[in-house]
Structures are given as C-alpha cells and as structure tokens.
Amino acid sequence: MQQNDKNVARTKVNQLNTARKKHVCETDEKKKSMKNDIVRLTNIATAFEKGERKMAIAMRISFTDVLRDGTLKNVYVNGKKMGYRFDVRLSYYRGHFLSVIDELTVSVDGEEVKPQDITFCLHGKEFGISQLHEATTEFWGIREPATIKIFREGGLEKGEHEIDFHLVFRSPYMPIGEQAFMPWDSSQCKILTVES
C-alpha cells in the first residue's frame, strides 16, 4: 500500500514536471506558482518515503484567491514600522476551525519568515502559529478574511513584493482512515504591492 502511494506521488511529480516543460505560461506568476507546486509535491513525496508523513498528496483546488489584493500594508507602532500585514481567505467550499491547520508558513521575496514572527488574526483575536492547534472554537468562514501579521522591524519597502503563503489543513469532513483526514492545500504565491 505504501509503495503504491509513493508511486502515485512520484507519478504526480513527473506529470507536473512534464506539464511545466510543455506548457508556456502566460505570466511569471503562473510559472512561479507551478514551480512552487512541483517543489511542494516533491518535498511531500520525499517526506512520505522517509516515514515523516502519512499522506503523500494534499488536495488542491482553487476556490478563490487566497492572498487578497490591496491588503499588504506596513504596521506602525508609535510611529515606527514594526512589521507588515496582509489578508488571506480559505480556499475551500466550507469553513473550518483553526485547530485543523497543520502547516502555516510565509516567505516574502524568497526569504522565509520565522514562525515566531507570524501572527494569525481572526475575529479580533491573535494567535501564534503554535496556538492554532488549540483554537478548537475559532471558526474561519470561507467568506471572511483572516489577517496575517508579520513582525519585522522596518516593515517592507514601498512597491511590489512576492508573498508565498503556505497553508495545509486536514479536512474533518474527508476521513481517509480511522484517525486520519485528507490534507488540503490552501496556499498561494502572488505579487502584492505596498502603497506606502
């Protein structure tokens, strides 16, 4: 069974690689998105082979833009830039409790943000990444944006920045075993602009 799952994962990676070579993307953003998907699938397949993951593939269907245009802004505290923020939406057909989030990472302009510098904000409450598993009563609806705040002294310079937001959650409505649920990839890489 595990060998079959490994083969499925490797086949998917090969298909994406072949599609990447044959398909001429219309924009750099599409090229980067496809490359990120291939890297993520390769990493998942490798982790599965090492026994670090139970499921080789995370489901992914784009229901909406995860990263919201016009929301990348610097955060000021006492007149000093102390970080930045942007809004995200859940790319799924129904909402979920925050406790089902298994992975949440952010990279900006190719630089990964430390987990301790990321805050997930919803309903006027703020959660560190390590607190999300305990947020069993906080429901994230599909139409309401959450705000991601990043602590970074000096914030971001005015202009365009590549935001790579990676979110994987397990869907409690899709069991794949006695105590396992389908992982769902609600990630996006996109260029957002800081106006000031």
Image (tube, rainbow, N blue to C red):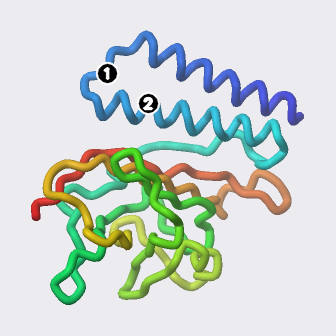
Q: Are marks 2 and 1 in contact (CB under 8 Å)?
A: yes
Reading the image, the residue beneath label 1 is 25
Reading the image, the residue beneath label 2 is 34
Front residue (pair 73, 121) = 73
Q: Is residue 146 visible?
A: no
Q: Which numbered disc flags the more N-terminal residue, 2 or 1?
A: 1
Residue 180 horizontal side relative to residue 170, left or right: right
Could you tell me which residue is drawn at 59 percent across and 79 percent down? 131
Q: Position of residue 87 (x, y in %)?
A: 31, 65
Residue 84 horizontal side relative to residue 53, left or right: left
Which quadrant of the figure has residue 86?
Answer: bottom left
Which quadrant of the figure has residue 172?
Answer: bottom right
**Residue farthest toward the right in the current orientation of the protein:** 1
Q: Is residue 143 visible?
A: yes
Could you tell me which residue is drawn at 44 percent across and 30 percent down? 34
Q: Is residue 93 above or below residue 61?
A: below
Q: Position of residue 143 (x, y in %)?
A: 34, 66
Front residue (pair 9, 148) = 148
